[in-house]
Amino acid sequence: MKTGPNAKWVASPDVRSTYSEDGAVLLDIRKGLCYSLNPVAARVWITVEASPSGLDLRGLVDVMETHYTISREQLERDIKEYLAKLEHTGLVQRNGLLHESKAAGARG
């Protein structure tokens, strides 16, 4: 995923979430699709969701770094990969731009 240093990520307004010790479940109410997240992915989601004005990659890595003991570089790579998946499915938006997923297009 290539983004500029000023790219900000926000949760899609069409997503609802619920949490447990096992992670989270996200529901895209527009598409009628559910997604399950493991505890680590859920923590990334909670952080993005808690920032309605958007959060850049550096800020997200800063927050996540307080919870995990892996290198900052590895954490950044993992978060980039995860954000790309979330963007592809339409669960997050970069700079307020919605990325239509293949699943959404297939449903018409």
Image (cartoon, rainbow, N blue to C red):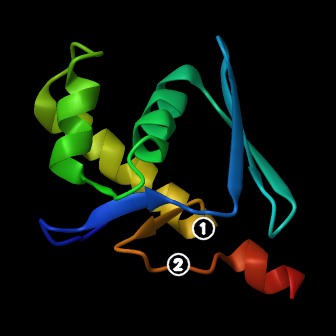
Q: Secondary structure at mark 1?
A: loop
Is 17 located above or below residue 29 in the figure? above
Task: Tell me where residue 74 appears, x and y as whole percent.
Answer: 21, 34
Tell me the kind of residue under disc 2.
Answer: Leu
Residue at the image position 87 percent from the left and 61 percent from the top: 32
Is the residue marked by circle 2 packed among few (<14), some (14-19), or many (20+) residues within 10 Å? some
**Closer to the camera in the image, 74 or 91:** 91
Task: Tell me where residue 19 appears, x and y as whole percent.
Answer: 67, 24
Task: Tell me where residue 29 appears, x and y as whole percent.
Answer: 81, 61
Task: Identify the residue under disc 2.
Answer: 98
Label 1 vs 2, first from the N-terminus = 1
Residue at the image position 86 percent from the left and 88 percent from the top: 108
Residue at the image position 38 percent from the left and 51 percent from the top: 81
Task: Identify the residue under disc 1.
Answer: 90
How far apart are the alpha carbons under marks 1 and 2? Answer: 6 Å
Residue at the image position 42 percent from the left and 54 percent from the top: 52
The reply to whether callout 1 and callout 2 are in contact (CB within 8 Å) is yes
Residue 78 shown left or right of residue 103 in the figure: left
